[in-house]
């Protein structure tokens, strides 16, 4: 099989300028005005319900992958890694639990229905002006610039990832797709040419500019000033890629994302504690990994081969 990076989505933090600047008492600096998640908790608490019909924060807390991505996004800043070098799940350790505690604290300021919200529901609330801050994908910022989609044009800013004390700067690139040509393809040359066309810089830029949910797979697209003019998050996303955190792409990964998210969602709706959720998830993930041959003499994926891409910010100074 041959694959080309396609639809590489990046989770980010977006703010309503007018509301957040009132709390801060001045203009927003994208790097330093909300330096930590504790500060985001404080700001979202102050803004929660201050304007009728506007909640403090938007979260994607629906069952399955949506809750997984929200938790991974925050827990990555605390230093969370999913596996050790033997592919044993370790995400239910201190860092993972710190991430869980943080999203549980944010959830107290979240919009009603967040525990059932995926991309579509979160998008509607953000673009409709129903949340003062939002944790979502980069296209939420691009869409917010478009008068045909957004009621908050000119009144938002996408910031650099807030940090967690004792953690790291690890803005997550935690969801994406790779377009592939199968070994059994009847016309592999034709299929490859189609994929090559769909992943040219111009097509990727058009997808992001149109805010259709397909994120660019090439950094060069994000640094293009023409795209940055119509996609405010592009500049922040491009700089953040130097420090990105990523989940490994493994056999059974989607199933694992589903079971993690189901447990995280149970914590969000107060059925179990955050620690119980992660412990349950770790046990379920280990079972899936074992079914996929990861604990035999030769696992299907060598950990050392993927390790450099799990957090590319290692040993790098902070960008600002």
Image (cartoon, helix red, strand yellow):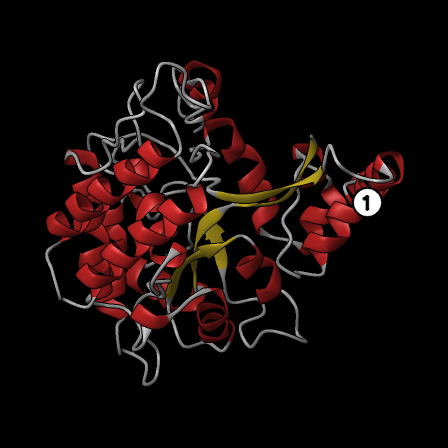
Compared with 167, 30 (above or below) is below
Viewport quadrant of the C terminus: top left
Viewport quadrant of the N terminus: top right
Give the labeled residue for mark 1.
202
Compared with 26, 75 (above or below) is above
| Count of picture labels | 1
User: 187 or 144: which is nearer to us?
Assistant: 187
Q: Quadrant of residue 18?
A: bottom left
Compared with 33, 120 (above or below) is below
Give residue 290's position: percent from left, percent from top: 31, 32
| Outermost residue, bottom side | 52
Look at 26% across and 78% down and name the residue there: 49
| 10 Å crowding of disc 1: few (<14), some (14-19), many (20+) | few
Look at 41% across and 21% down and name the residue there: 299
Look at 17% across and 52% down and name the residue there: 277
User: 86 or 23: which is nearer to us?
Assistant: 86
Q: Is residue 160 visible?
A: no
Give residue 291's position: percent from left, percent from top: 35, 36
Q: Quadrant of residue 230?
A: bottom right
Q: Taking 307 as reference, is 237 left or right?
A: right
Q: Taking 306 as reference, is 142 left or right?
A: right
Look at 29% across and 63% down and name the residue there: 23
Q: Is residue 65 visible?
A: yes
Give residue 221's position: percent from left, percent from top: 71, 39
User: 106 or 9: which is nearer to us?
Assistant: 9
């Amino acid at each position: 099989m041959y694959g080309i990076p396609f639809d590489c989505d990046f989770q980010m933090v977006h703010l309503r300028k007018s509301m957040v600047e009132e709390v801060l008492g001045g203009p927003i600096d994208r790097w330093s005005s909300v330096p930590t998640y504790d500060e985001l908790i404080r700001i979202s608490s102050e803004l929660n319900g201050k304007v009728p019909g506007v909640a403090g924060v938007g979260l994607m807390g629906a069952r399955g992958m949506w809750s997984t991505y929200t938790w991974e996004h925050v827990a990555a800043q605390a230093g969370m890694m999913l596996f050790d070098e033997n592919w044993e799940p370790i995400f239910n350790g201190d860092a993972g639990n710190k991430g869980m505690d943080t999203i549980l604290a944010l959830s107290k300021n979240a919009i009603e229905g967040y525990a059932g919200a995926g991309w579509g529901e979160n998008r509607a609330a953000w673009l409709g002006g129903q949340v003062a801050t939002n944790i979502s994908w980069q296209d939420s910022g691009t869409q917010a610039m478009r008068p045909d989609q957004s009621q908050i044009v000119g009144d938002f800013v996408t910031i650099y990832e807030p940090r967690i004390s004792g953690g790291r700067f690890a803005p997550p690139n935690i969801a994406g797709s790779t377009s592939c040509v199968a070994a059994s393809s009847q016309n592999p040359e034709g299929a490859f040419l189609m994929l090559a066309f769909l992943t040219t810089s111009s097509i990727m830029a058009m997808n992001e500019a149109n805010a259709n949910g397909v994120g660019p797979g090439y950094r060069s697209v994000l640094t293009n000033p023409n795209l940055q003019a119509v996609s405010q998050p592009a500049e922040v996303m491009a700089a953040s890629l130097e420090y990105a955190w990523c989940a490994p792409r493994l056999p059974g990964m989607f199933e694992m994302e589903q079971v993690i998210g189901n447990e995280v969602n149970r914590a969000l709706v107060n059925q179990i504690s955050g620690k119980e959720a992660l412990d349950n998830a770790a046990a379920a993930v280990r079972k899936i990994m074992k079914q996929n041959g990861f604990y035999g003499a030769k696992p299907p994926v060598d950990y050392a081969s993927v390790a450099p891409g799990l957090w590319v910010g290692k040993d790098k100074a902070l960008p600002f």
